[in-house]
C-alpha cells in the first residue's frame, strides 16, 4: 500500500523518541499499559495484516487478485469518519519463526492487527506483545442483528466454540479471533485409479499400502503432498495419535479445560510432552515412537522424490500422480486450473489397524487443520491507544455477511461464524473436520532452534540421509536441549505433573523398553 512505509517510518521515529526521552515502553516481560506521562497518540490508522485475505493476493497462485478486504475496509471507514484501515503483510522470515515480527513487536511498531498461529504467540504472551481479548469477547457485536448469535456476547457468534476456546494460551487467556477453518484431505484422481483396478480409496492403512504397491508395479508413482512439508510434518502427528490413542488418557497429565474438551480431547501441551520425555516417552526407549517414525518413513517411500522445492501439486493437476495430500487451499486450484480434465474426489487418511502395527487403535485418523486465520491485536494498539478501534474492526470483519464474502472470494477456508454460508465446493472438508482433533502438533509445539533442527533432521531421515536409530538419537539430544531451555519457567514447573505421574507410573512404565 502506498502509505505503508511512511506509517512505519513515523512509528519508528515515535518509538525512538520515546526511548530517548523517557522510559515509555515497558521493561522486557512487562505488558505495555497506558501511563499518566504517555501522551495519547494522534494516530487514526489501524495497520492490519489479514493473512491470505491481503488485498491483491492471488490465492494459491491462480485466479483473480482478492478485492473483498479492500471493500470491507472502505465500508468500515465510511462508518467511522476520520479512521483508516491500512493493510500491510507481515514478513515471514527464516524458518517461519517470526524473526521479523518479533523485532517489530519488541520495537512497538508491528501492525496493530496480525494473523499468526496462536501456538506461536503463546511463547511470548508474558512479554505483553498481545492484547487479551476475553473482556471484548464478552461484549455485544454491534454488527449482528439483535437476537442473533453474537448480539449479546461476541464469542457466541463463532460456530465452533471448542475450537475458539482451544486457542486459549496456557495462562487461560484468549489472544486471538479464529475467523475460519482450514482442513486437509486426500485428493484423488478417480480416472487413474479406475484404470488400475480401484473403484475407491481404501479405508485402512494396509489397504492404502497395497494399492500404492500395485500402482508402483504398474509404473505409477502413487502419491505426493503439498510443497510445504505437510506430509512429513503433520503426517507424524496423525500417525502419532493412531498409535498412542489407547494410552492418551493416561499420558494426558494436564487435561484440557471443559470448554475445549470437545475439540482437543487428550491433547498434549508442549510442557506435558517435555515432562514425559524426561520419563522415557518419545525417546528411543519408547516403542510407539519408533513405530511412528518407521511407518512415516515407509509411507514416504510411496511419494514423489521432490517434496519441498518445486510444485508437486502440479504432478497431480496434470494427471501424473493419482493421490495428493493437501489442504482445502487446493479446491481453488481444482476448480480453476485448465489442466484438470479428470474426475476427482476428496477423502481422508485411512485408519491404521493391527494389520500395520500392533500398537494401532483402529480408530479413525484425527484431523490436523483447525483454525486458519487467527487474528491478534498487538502491543502497537496499546501504544497508539486504538485498541477499541481494532476490536470494532474485528467485530465488523466477523459479522456473517462480511466473513462469508471474504471466504467465498478466496475459496480456501470454511467460515467459523454462525449464519455465514460455506461454498458447497468446500463441503467435503466440513465433513472431515467433524472428526476428533489430533493429540499433538509436534513441530508447532517446539520453538526456535529446536524446531528448525527437528525439521532438518526429519527431511534428512526421510530422504535416506540417516537410518532410524541415528535419527532417533538426534531427536533425543534435541529434545533434551529443548526441555532444558524451558526449565525454570513458571509454565514448565513439573511439580503437578510429577504427582500425577507417580499415580500412573506403574502402568505407564510397562510401555517403555528398559534399555535401548
Image: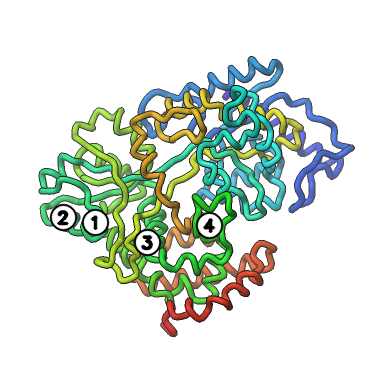
* Residue 201 percent location from the top left of the image: 22, 48
Q: Report the residue marked by disc 1.
A: 302
Q: Name which quarter of the figure residue 391 lies in.
A: top right
The image quarter containing residue 2 is top right
Q: CA distance from mark 2 to mark 3?
A: 26 Å
Name which of mark 1 and mark 2 comes first in the sequence. Answer: 2
Tell me: residue 315, above or below residue 145: below
- Residue projecting furthest to the bottom: 515
Quadrant of image for the C terminus:
bottom left
Visual colour scheme: rainbow
Mark 4: give few (<14), some (14-19) or many (20+) Cα within 10 Å.
Answer: some
User: Is mark 2 in CB contact (under 8 Å) with mark 3?
Assistant: no
Give percent across and percent down for residue 393.
63, 27
Q: Compute the Cα span from label 4 to label 2.
A: 36 Å
**Mark positioned earlier in the residue sequence (3 or 1):** 3
Label 3 or label 1, whichever lies nearer to me, is 3
Q: Are marks 1 and 2 in contact (CB under 8 Å)?
A: yes
Secondary structure beneath label 1 = loop
- Marks 4 and 1, how far apart in space? 28 Å
**Rounded to the nearest whole Å, what is the CA distance between mark 4 and mark 3?**
19 Å
Q: Position of residue 400 (x, y in %)?
A: 52, 26
Q: Visible in this render: residue 482?
A: no
User: Disc 3 designates what residue?
Assistant: 242
Checking the image for residue 216, the label placed there is 2
Amino acid at each position: 500500500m502506498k502509505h505503508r512505509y511512511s506509517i512505519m517510518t513515523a512509528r519508528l521515529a515515535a518509538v525512538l523518541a520515546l526511548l530517548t526521552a523517557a522510559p515509555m515502553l515497558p521493561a522486557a516481560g512487562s505488558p505495555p499499559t497506558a501511563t499518566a506521562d504517555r501522551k495519547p497518540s494522534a494516530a487514526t490508522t489501524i495497520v492490519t495484516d489479514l493473512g491470505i485475505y491481503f488485498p491483491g493476493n492471488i490465492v494459491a497462485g491462480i485466479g483473480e487478485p482478492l478485492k473483498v478486504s479492500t471493500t470491507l475496509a472502505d465500508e468500515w471507514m465510511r462508518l467511522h469518519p476520520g479512521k483508516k484501515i491500512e493493510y500491510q503483510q507481515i514478513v515471514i522470515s527464516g524458518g517461519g519463526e517470526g524473526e521479523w515480527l518479533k523485532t517489530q513487536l519488541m520495537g512497538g511498531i508491528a501492525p496493530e492487527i496480525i494473523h499468526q498461529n496462536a501456538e506461536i504467540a503463546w511463547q511470548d504472551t508474558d512479554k505483553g506483545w498481545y492484547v487479551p481479548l476475553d473482556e471484548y469477547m464478552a461484549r455485544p457485536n454491534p454488527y449482528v442483528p439483535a437476537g442473533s448469535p453474537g448480539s449479546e456476547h461476541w464469542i457466541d457468534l463463532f460456530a465452533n466454540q471448542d475450537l475458539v476456546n482451544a486457542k486459549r494460551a496456557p495462562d487461560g487467556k484468549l489472544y486471538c479471533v479464529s475467523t475460519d477453518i482450514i482442513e486437509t484431505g486426500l485428493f484423488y484422481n478417480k480416472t487413474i485409479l479406475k484404470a488400475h483396478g480401484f473403484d475407491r480409496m481404501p479405508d485402512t492403512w494396509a489397504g492404502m499400502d497395497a494399492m500404492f504397491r500395485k500402482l508402483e508395479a504398474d509404473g505409477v508413482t502413487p502419491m505426493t503432498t503439498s510443497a510445504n512439508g505437510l506430509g512429513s510434518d503433520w503426517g507424524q502427528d496423525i500417525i502419532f495419535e493412531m498409535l498412542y490413542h489407547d494410552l492418551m488418557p493416561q499420558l494426558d497429565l494436564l487435561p484440557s479445560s471443559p470448554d475445549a474438551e470437545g475439540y482437543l480431547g487428550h491433547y498434549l501441551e508442549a510442557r506435558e510432552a517435555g515432562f514425559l520425555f524426561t520419563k522415557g516417552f518419545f525417546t528411543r526407549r519408547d516403542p510407539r515412537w519408533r513405530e511412528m517414525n518407521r511407518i512415516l518413513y515407509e509411507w514416504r517411500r510411496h511419494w514423489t522424490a521432490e517434496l519441498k522445492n518445486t510444485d508437486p501439486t502440479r504432478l497431480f493437476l496434470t494427471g501424473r500422480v493419482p493421490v495428493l495430500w493437501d489442504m482445502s487451499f487446493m479446491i481453488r486450484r481444482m476448480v480453476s486450473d485448465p489442466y484438470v480434465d479428470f474426475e476427482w474426489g476428496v477423502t481422508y487418511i485411512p485408519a491404521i489397524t493391527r494389520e500395520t502395527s500392533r500398537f494401532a487403535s483402529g480408530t479413525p485418523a484425527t484431523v490436523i487443520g483447525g483454525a486458519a486465520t487467527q487474528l491478534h491485536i498487538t502491543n502497537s494498539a496499546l501504544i497508539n491507544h486504538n485498541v477499541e478501534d481494532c476490536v470494532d474492526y474485528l467485530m465488523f470483519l466477523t459479522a456473517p455477511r462480511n466473513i462469508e464474502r471474504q471466504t467465498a472470494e478466496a475459496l480456501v477456508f470454511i467460515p467459523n461464524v454462525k449464519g455465514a454460508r460455506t461454498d458447497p465446493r468446500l463441503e467435503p472438508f466440513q465433513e472431515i473436520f467433524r472428526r476428533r482433533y489430533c493429540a499433538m502438533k509436534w513441530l508447532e509445539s517446539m520453538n526456535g532452534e529446536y524446531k528448525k533442527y527437528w525439521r532438518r533432521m526429519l527431511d534428512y531421515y526421510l530422504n535416506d540421509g540417516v537410518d532410524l536409530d541415528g535419527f532417533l538419537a538426534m531427536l533425543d539430544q534435541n529434545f533434551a536441549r529443548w526441555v532444558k531451555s524451558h526449565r525454570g519457567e513458571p509454565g514448565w514447573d513439573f511439580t503437578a505433573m510429577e504427582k500425577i505421574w507417580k499415580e500412573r507410573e506403574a502402568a505407564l512404565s510397562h510401555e517403555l523398553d528398559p534399555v535401548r
